[in-house]
Image (cartoon, grey):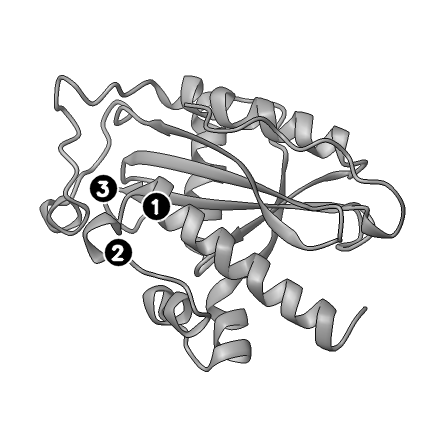
Amino acid sequence: MEVMDSPAPVAGKNAVAGRFRGFLPVVVDVETGGFDARTDALLEVAAVIVGRDEEGRWRREATHACHVEPFAGANIEAAALEFTGIDPYHPFRGAVSEAEALRTVFQPIRGAVKAAGCTRAVLVGHNPAFDLGFINEAVKRTGIKRNPFHPFSSFDTATLGGLAFGQTVLARAVQAAGMEWESDSAHSAIYDAERTADLFCTIVNLWDQRIGI
């Protein structure tokens, strides 16, 4: 599901590629059937591409997301479904296979990396080892060759939120940054990814304005 078009490249001092050593930050959130990326189902994936406006401020640009069918033999914990509210087998869920979900999300990311003059994407997440682990395991299962993400590097908004606002819980960090948090919308991949992207952009903008690079 595509929400917005990918950003056009920004030239000069506002260039995306020059800010993070050639990496394009892409914010990812996954919803899953448990905590073990090797055995538990990937149920939702959302990726938010960020870019810079004409004044050099970071902002959300595009969101790409899919509901995902559990892979064959996947484990799904009842507690995980109770937490997320996901019914993996709901007939109107519109879920697609892991391979199709990854292709749907990866293709615009690769385009945005190229448009920004970057070398690859770097995953941004709230405790991103969890999200990156599920992405990497899904890539292995599906045999997809062109994973746009760095295989182990990531940016953690839990750490950045603690540094900037003294809050490591996503909801509290978002609110401390002066933004609204809707508890009823939380724990969907799109909502959490977009709020995480807003938090990331806010922190980077504050740093660039007050400290510079």
Above or below 164: residue 55: above
**Front residue (pair 203, 113):** 203
- Decide which of tag 3 and tag 1 comes sooner along the chain: 3
Residue 150, image x, y percentages: 64, 44
Q: Is the residue under label 1 in contact with that under label 3 (CB below 8 Å)?
A: no
Q: Which residue is mark 2?
A: 182
For the point 59% across and 25% down, the residue is 108
Q: Is the residue under label 1 in contact with that under label 2 (CB below 8 Å)?
A: yes
Q: Can residue 33 be spotted in the picture?
A: yes
Helix, strand or loop under label 1: helix
Amino acid type indicated by mark 3:
Gly
Above or below 77: residue 112: above
Q: CA distance from mark 2 to mark 3?
A: 23 Å
**Front residue (pair 205, 104):** 205
Judge from the rendering whether residue 110 lies leftward or rightward of residue 200; answer left or right.
right
Q: CA distance from mark 2 to mark 1?
A: 9 Å
For the point 20% across and 23% down, the residue is 93
Judge from the rendering whether residue 138 lies leftward or rightward of residue 43; answer left or right.
right
Q: Residues within 10 Å of mark 1 (few under 14, many from 20)?
A: some
For marks 2 and 1, give the one nearer the viewer.
Answer: 2
Residue 37, image x, y percentages: 36, 44
**Front residue (pair 105, 138):** 105
Q: Residues within 10 Å of mark 3 (few under 14, many from 20)?
A: many
For the point 51% across and 40% down, the residue is 48
Q: Which residue is mark 3?
A: 33
